[in-house]
Image (cartoon, rainbow, N blue to C red):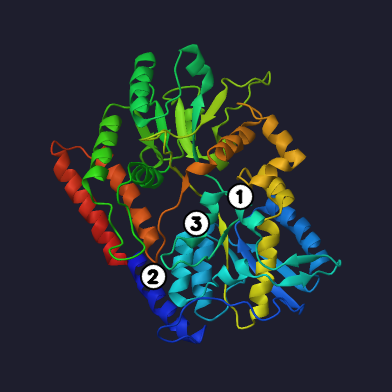
Amino acid sequence: MKKRIIAALLLVTMLFATVVMTGCGAGAVPNFEVPEGGYDGSEVTITFYHTMDATKRAIVDAYIEEFNKLYPNIHIVHSQVGGYDDVRDQISTEITTGNQPNIAYCYPDHVALFNSALAVASLDSLIDSKIELTRADGTTEVLGLTKEQINDFIEGYYNEGAQFGDGLMYSLPFSKSTEVLYYNKTFFDANGLTVPTTWDEMEALCARIKELDPTAIPLGYDSESNWFITMCEQYGSDYTSASGDHFLFDNEENRAFVKKFREWYQKGYVTTQTIYGNYTSGLFISETGTRSYMSIGSSAGASHQTPAKDADGNRPFEVGIASIPQVNPENPKVISQGPSVCIFKKSNPQEVVASWLFVKFLTTNALFQAEFGMSSGYVPVIKSVSEIPAYADFLAKADGGDYLTALSAKVCLDQADAYYTSPAFNGSSEARSQVGPLLVTCMTTATDDVDALLDQAFQTAIDECEYMN
């Protein structure tokens, strides 16, 4: 109930902000147009909300110094605002008074929410701008993105910024992660097991692992929501739409895979974060009691999938990392996660242009992307990081122990063509919040009438989505 009240209040304040903050009335559109001349050199202060810890903030600080050698009158003030949802919630409140930051970490559904008040600046005119700027060091740059810069972005990451149903671009990728399959390579090698490339192979492998270790739960999957959404994408079945009827996930194909995963759970093949009560990496790195031999989790969490060393400095097993299984390995689909950045409208358009220059500086800068990626465990968003010697050396060290983070990044970069994003609209996060519990309910509820269980669970999830929307 509290969630529904907050959502209702937020909707009212957002609609109010449409007039108060932007001065826009009915029929207004959120397009931002670059002012004549682009950035005029005026002194502006740009605020940037994110979730970075002290180590990552220090890297950003170093690059702000480099940026200010080019644009000394653009002052960047950045701060950690809790987690991603905390960033979203604080900005949602600040939008109502026109006090939102200039730049923020975002996920697509956050952008859709902010745009209920037309608060996010579209980037198209900035990206397309041919205006040439002279920087403080005497060098020049084009305000927009060159064709080479656009092509340098990993396509799936870049395309996320235009998933809003209106054809406009609202964000650029900043640093990314995905899901990968961690597996106990030592156990696999000792027992002649093959890493699964399809879900059918995964099912057969889980059965074989149960034969080898009857007490095991062969597979742990951290995010039930990701699993459901990814299966929709891999099957090509309906999940959501940015236009028309938004919530489309109640269909026979989706019910079929949910029923199959229920069977896996009943056979002891799989657990999830909610069912287990914690990240399933705990089962994966366990050396006693019930354990798993595979874990599907965030690529940025590789350090949590690494077993601890013993007193002699040895790890109990080597970890392997692979892409997650597919319905069709010839047409792979893997979820894109991690923050993008959006720029907010301001009464002074120079703030928007200055914000763009800083965002462009970080997202297209291979040195920054490489250094930030090595420090954070996230994957750089541009391909040219491979030309940075330090990052090439980092990837070359990839192994199943001390350099598991590098191995994770390597797998992510190798599957760059597989990334997808779901449609984003105001309310799309509710679909995500419902399909995870739906999957858990259908997997764990004791019943002889599975079809009736699925009917009820899917209908409840759809009803909740529509109520909240």
Mark 1 or mark 2: which comes first in sequence? Answer: 2
- Residue 5 appears left or right of 110: left
**As drawn, 190 above or below 89:** above
Q: Position of residue 389 (x, y in %)?
A: 76, 39
Q: Residue 381 carries which label?
A: 1
Q: Are marks 1 and 2 in contact (CB under 8 Å)?
A: no
Say which amino acid is labelled 3.
Glu
How many angstroms separate mark 1 from mark 2 (CA)?
34 Å
Q: Residues within 10 Å of mark 2 (few under 14, many from 20)?
A: few
Dividing the picture into quadrants, the one containing residue 129 is bottom right
Say which amino acid is labelled 2.
Ile
How many angstroms separate mark 1 from mark 3 (CA)?
12 Å
Q: Mark 3 highlights which residue?
A: 160
Dividing the picture into quadrants, the one containing residue 209 is top left
Asked which secondary structure carries label 2, the reply is helix
Residue at horizontal 38%, vertical 30%? 198
Query: Of the residues tagged 3 and 2, which is closer to the observer?
Result: 3
User: 132 or 381, which is in the foreground?
Assistant: 132
Mark 3 or mark 2: which comes first in sequence? Answer: 2
Q: Does residue 338 appear in this view?
A: no
Q: Where is residue 392 in the image (x, y as percent from the top left)?
A: 71, 36
Q: Mark 2 highlights which residue?
A: 6
Say which amino acid is labelled 1.
Val
Quarter of the figure that contains the N terminus: bottom left
How many angstroms separate mark 3 from mark 2 (CA)?
27 Å
Q: Does residue 83 appear in this view?
A: yes
Q: Residues within 10 Å of mark 3 (few under 14, many from 20)?
A: many
